[in-house]
Amino acid sequence: MEKKTCPDCQEKLPSHKTEETGLPAAFLRFRVSQMDVTYGGGIVAGGTVVKWFGDLATELCIRYDGDEGLLASYDLLEFKRPVHAGDYLEFTGRITKVGNRSRRIEMECYKVLAPDPDRGPTAARVLPEPELVARAHGTVVAPKPKA
Ligand SMILES: CC(C)(COP(=O)(O)OP(=O)(O)OC[C@H]1O[C@@H](n2cnc3c(N)ncnc32)[C@H](O)[C@@H]1OP(=O)(O)O)[C@@H](O)C(=O)NCCC(=O)NCCS
């Protein structure tokens, strides 16, 4: 997929191909719901964030292999900021290396909008810069080719 530009703001829209390598890239964007909250203070569990990384990893594998693949390991998992209900998250990820059946993946999660409860129960704001919330590096494995 060619890189596209938003006709309104001229910002680069996410591409499904990494420019440098030509390997697949993927993108998820959504609002965190009250139903995603596990902990006090309206905080989302790290395991839920990992589930969302898994959805992105699955898309990467589908784009490369036409198969969901299986997640074999994470060798890096970092939680940098808490996630709350009402946050808008953007996940970006890419395949960085292709083995025989292994595909190395790197993914980040950014918060771009957040609730602003000091101004009122429904107030929210656009963050001046996307805030890095979590990172994950790992390996997905494609199925054995049919004999
Ligand atoms: C992932 C899994 C399919 C690999 O098993 P396998 O097919 O026997 O793997 P193999 O030993 O033949 O290795 C295949 C490739 O995966 C790589 N690999 C296997 N396990 C790995 C691990 N834990 N970490 C990184 N790479 C791994 C191998 O190095 C090899 O790479 P290559 O093809 O580039 O040479 C298997 O361990 C599995 O089913 N795990 C459970 C997966 C799962 O349920 N994930 C959660 C839901 S998605």
Image: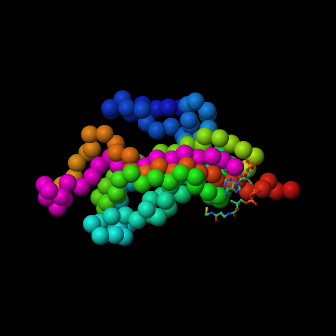
Quick one: which residue is furthest to the right in this view? 147
For the magenta stretch, what is the residue range?
A: 102-122
Q: Observer-nearest residue: 76 or 140?
A: 76
What residue is rendered at 55% in x and 49% in y?
137
The image position of residue 98, as x and y in percent, is 68, 42
39 left or right of 140? left
User: Considering depth in this image, is 28 or 38 the residue closer to the camera?
Assistant: 38
Q: Is residue 13 left or right of residue 127?
A: right
Residue 109 visible (yes or no): yes
| Residue at image coords 50%, 37% | 15
As displayed, is residue 100 above or below residue 82?
A: above
- Looking at the magenta stretch, what is its main secondary structure? strand
Instruction: Farthest residue to the left: give it.
Output: 119
- Camera sees residue 33: no
| Residue 10: x %, y % from top left | 36, 29
Count the marks: 0
